[in-house]
Amino acid sequence: MSTGPSRTVVLLLNLAHALDHLFLLIFATAVAAIAADFGFARWEDLMPYGAGAFVMFGLASAPAGRLGDLWGRRRMMLLFYFGIGASSLLAALAQGPWQLAAALTLLGTFSAIYHPVGIPMLLQHSQRPGRTIGWSGLAGNLGIAAAAGLTGLLVAWAGWRAAFVVPGLVSIAMGVVFARVAPPETEAPARRTSRAAVPLPAALLARVFLVMTAAAIASSVLFNFTTNGNGRLMAERLQGLVTDPSKLGALLAAVYAVASLAQLIVGQLIDRFALKPLYLAILLAQVPLLLLAAQAQGWWIFAALLATMALIFGAIPFTDAMIVRYVDDRLRSRVAGMRLTVAFGFSSGAVWLLGPLVKANGFAAMLTVMAGISALSALAVLWLPGDAHLRRAAAAQAAPAA
C-alpha cells in the first residue's frame, strides 16, 4: 500500500513553498535600494524590469507540470532547489538593470516548478487535502512575510545583493538535504491509475476548469499587485510615522504573517463545508476592504492591509482544492501547470503595470481597480456548479451502464 512522504520531506516541500514566494518578492522589496544603486531617480521606473520573473512564473508552469507528471516530481523539485538558488546568486552579481532582468527571468523560470509539482507531491496521499493545502499555503505566505522582513534587514545591514545571496545559498543547501531524504519515485505520476475523489464527466470538468482558471487569473492579479506594491504603499501612507526600511519591512512582515493564518483556517473549512458558498463569501468580502484600503492613511493602512491580505490569501487554496477533488493524480501537475500558465500569464502584467499605474494615478486608483477585479471574480465563481450537482454528476459518471 502506498504511503505519503515522510515528515522531513513534507517539511522540505512546505519550506520550498516559502522559498518560492520569498525569491519572487526580493526584487520588489529591495527595489528602492537597487534603483538608487543603478542610478534611477524613481523606483517605479525600475519596477518593469522585474516583470520577466512573473511572465516565466506563468509560462514555464505548463512544461514544469508536464515534466512533473511524465519525468517525476522528485527530480523536478531537485531542479527547483538548485535552479532557483543559482539564479538568485546570478541576480546578486548583476551590474545593471538588464543583467538583473535576465537573472530574475531565469529565477522566475525555476520558481514556476513548485506549484504544479510540489503541491501535487504533497497531496498525492493526503487524507485531508484541505488541511494539507492550508499548511502549504501558510508556509508560502510566511515566505512572503520573510521576503518583507528578511530582505529589509539584509538591505539595511549588508546591501541589496546580500538579499539575493543568503536565500540562494539556503536553497542550494536544502536541495542537498532533499536529495538525501526524498526516496526515488517507483513510477512517474502519469503511469498511476488512481482516480479523482469526485470524478466528473468531461463537459462538467471543463466548466469547473474554466471557472477555476478565471478565478485564478483574478486571484493572481490581486496577489501580484499587493505583494509587489504593499511595501511602497506602506512607505507612502506611513510617511512621517515610520521611515526606517527595516521597520517598514517588519510591519509588512507582520501583516503577511498574521494574514497567512487565513489559509490554515480556510484549509480546515474546505474539508468540512461546500466550496462554492465559502469561496463566494471570501471574494465578496474583499471588495469593501479594498475600497477602504484605497482611502486609509496613517496607521489605518496597517489595519486595512491586514484584513485585505487575510482575504486575498484566504482565497488562494480553492483552486488547489478543486484540482485535488476533481482531477486524477496522474494529471494533476499538468492541469495545475496549464491553469498557472494562463493565470500568471495574465497577472504578470500586474507587475509590469504597477510602477507606471501608481506613478500616473496613485495607489488609491490601483486599489479601486482591485476591488472591481474581486467583484468580477465573484461573478465567475457563481457559474461554478454547486457541490450537490457535482456529486450527482460524479455518481452518474461512476454508475455502470444499464
Image (cartoon, rainbow, N blue to C red):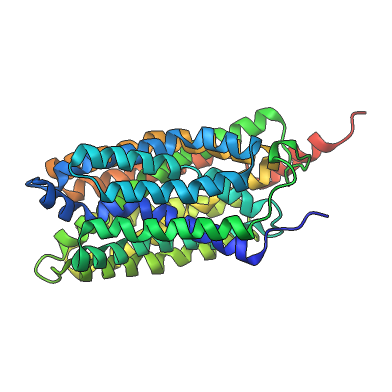
Q: In the picture provided, is 397 more to the left or to the right than 128?
A: right
Q: Is residue 68 above or below residue 3?
A: above
Q: Is residue 389 visible?
A: no
In the rendered image, the quadrant that contains the N terminus is bottom right
Instruction: Quadrant for residue 156, please give it.
Output: bottom left
Between 29 and 200, the one nearer to me in the picture: 29
Between 347 and 92, the one nearer to me in the picture: 92
Q: In the picture provided, is 35 more to the left or to the right than 161?
A: left
Q: Is residue 271 above or below residue 101?
A: below
Residue 339 picture location, percent across and down: 52, 36
Q: Residue at x 27, y 69 (%)?
A: 251
Residue 292 picture location, percent across and down: 26, 58
Q: Residue at x 34, y 47 (%)?
A: 224
Q: Residue at x 52, y 41 (%)?
A: 382
Q: In the picture provided, is 395 more to the left or to the right than 115?
A: right
Residue 278 picture location, percent across and down: 54, 55
Q: In the picture provided, is 389 more to the left or to the right than 312?
A: right
